[in-house]
Image (cartoon, rainbow, N blue to C red):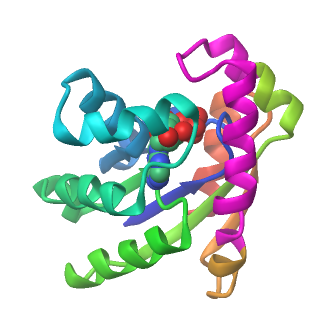
Amino acid sequence: MIIVLFGAPGVGKGTQAAILAEKLHVAHLSTGDAFRAAIRNQSEIGKVAKTYVDAGDLVPDSVVASIVEEAMQDPSFARGAILDGFPRTRAQADALAEMLQRRGLSVHRVVNIDVDDATITERLLSRGRADDTAEIIANRLDVYRQETAPLLEYYSAVDSLLVTVNGVGDVQDVNQRILDTI
Ligand code: ADP
């Protein structure tokens, strides 16, 4: 079962993905975490990704595809996965469909977690990650609106694939709302 958690930065994809992965006994793939680990390890991918992540810009699609392809080699992936932060562009959505098709898998649900901008900014500022400054947050929200949000239309074209869940409230309540849709 492949579940895509979708939504702007700060809607809680990472928090919810971790809980869902544990409850459903499937893998959790966060491209943001994967890039931060690559940057810490100073790998080739990390060197390329660093300038984009630091600026709050999207890492180029080809680099994203290679890190996802690598993560999918893990045997646990066949049992299912929660994708957190991927896909973020149409090219990534196409790449995902192709990678899954090769393995005889498909996306079961795209869960769009909906949170208002004021709450998002408040949450990110209090998290205090290096890319959580007011200026970089504003850029990440812009990038989300321009490059990622259009995917909602793309996924809504497939019957019963896309669901929207209110992401405001207690973490466990939001988790239950997501579970109710899958
Ligand atoms: P958030 O959702 O709060 O922005 P993430 O940890 O998901 O945090 O992402 C952090 C950064 O990693 C992004 O701003 C971007 O630079 C990079 N990144 C993560 N996922 C992708 C992706 N699918 N495509 C391109 N860049 C990505």
- Quarter of the C terminus within the rendering: bottom right
Question: Is residue 169 rendered to the left or right of residue 147?
Answer: right
Classify 181 as above or below 174: below
Q: Is residue 13 visible?
A: no
Place of residue 78 in the rendered image (x, y in percent of width and height, measured from the top left): 20, 65
Name the image quarter holding residue 60.
bottom left
Name the image quarter holding residue 138.
top right
Q: Is residue 139 magenta?
A: yes
- Say which residue appears at 36% left-offset and 40% top-offset: 49
Question: Is residue 33 rendered to the left or right of residue 110?
Answer: left
Of residues 111 and 97, which is closer to you in this image? Answer: 97
Q: Is residue 67 magenta?
A: no
Q: Which residues are magenta?
A: 123-152
Place of residue 58 in the rendered image (x, y in percent of width and height, measured from the top left): 52, 49
- Say which residue appears at 41% left-offset and 62% top-offset: 61
- Quarter of the N terminus within the rendering: bottom left
Classify 25 as above or below 72: above
